[in-house]
Image (cartoon, rainbow, N blue to C red):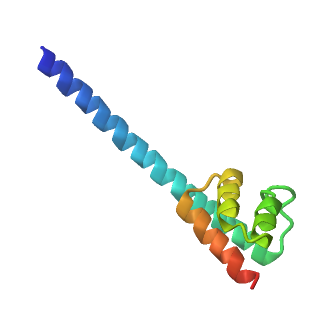
């Protein structure tokens, strides 16, 4: 009986872990799609009417040379993962040179 409970708990843990992994993957994909849409809107020069997040704090940190703080702030504002934030901060840094 104890073995059955252990197997059932292990199975539940495995299923929960798999679901969490899929959710994280979906969140990363969503963040990438949102970023691409932001870039398209920016490229077209369309006024998003407040739909775009206010990245002023990120730009302030970059102007001060605080790259790590800029990454942290970008993640807080946009909700993207670390990789996406680092890539975007690198893009912003490259475009301001």
Query: With respect to residue 48, does 8 lie above or below?
Result: above
* Vertical placement of residue 34 versus 97, above or below: above
Residue 68 occupies which quadrant of the picture? bottom right
Instruction: Locate the C terminus by quadrant.
Output: bottom right
32 displayed left or right of 93: left
As drawn, the residue found furthest toward the front would be 65
Which residue is at the far bottom?
Answer: 97
Using the rendered view, name the quadrant where residue 95 is placed. bottom right
Q: How many marks?
A: 0
Of the 4 image quadrants, the one containing the N terminus is: top left
Q: Return the x and y of residue 34 as percentages of the image width and height.
A: 65, 60
Quarter of the view holding residue 78: bottom right
In terms of depth relative to the viewer, which is nearer, 58 or 80?
Answer: 58
Seen in the picture, residue 15 relative to 40 is either above or below; the reply is above
Residue at coordinates 71% horizontally, 75% vertically from top-left?
92
Of residues 42 and 4, the one drawn nearer to the viewer in this rendering: 4
Of residue 73 and residue 68, the one placed in the foreground of this image is: 68
Residue 70 in the image, given as x and y percentages of width and height: 70, 63
- Identify the residue at image location x=59%, y=67%: 86
Task: Report the side of 84 relative to 96 (left or right).
Answer: left
* Residue sitting at x 71%, y 53%: 77
């Amino acid at each position: 009986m104890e073995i059955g409970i252990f197997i059932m708990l292990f199975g539940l843990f495995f299923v929960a872990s798999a679901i969490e992994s899929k959710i994280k993957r979906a969140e990363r994909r969503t963040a990438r799609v949102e970023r691409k849409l932001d870039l398209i809107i920016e490229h077209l020069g369309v006024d998003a009417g407040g739909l775009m997040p206010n990245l002023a704090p990120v730009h302030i940190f970059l102007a001060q040379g605080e790259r790590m703080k800029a990454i942290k702030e970008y993640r807080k504002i946009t909700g993207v993962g670390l990789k996406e934030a680092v890539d975007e901060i690198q893009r912003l840094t490259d475009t301001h040179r």
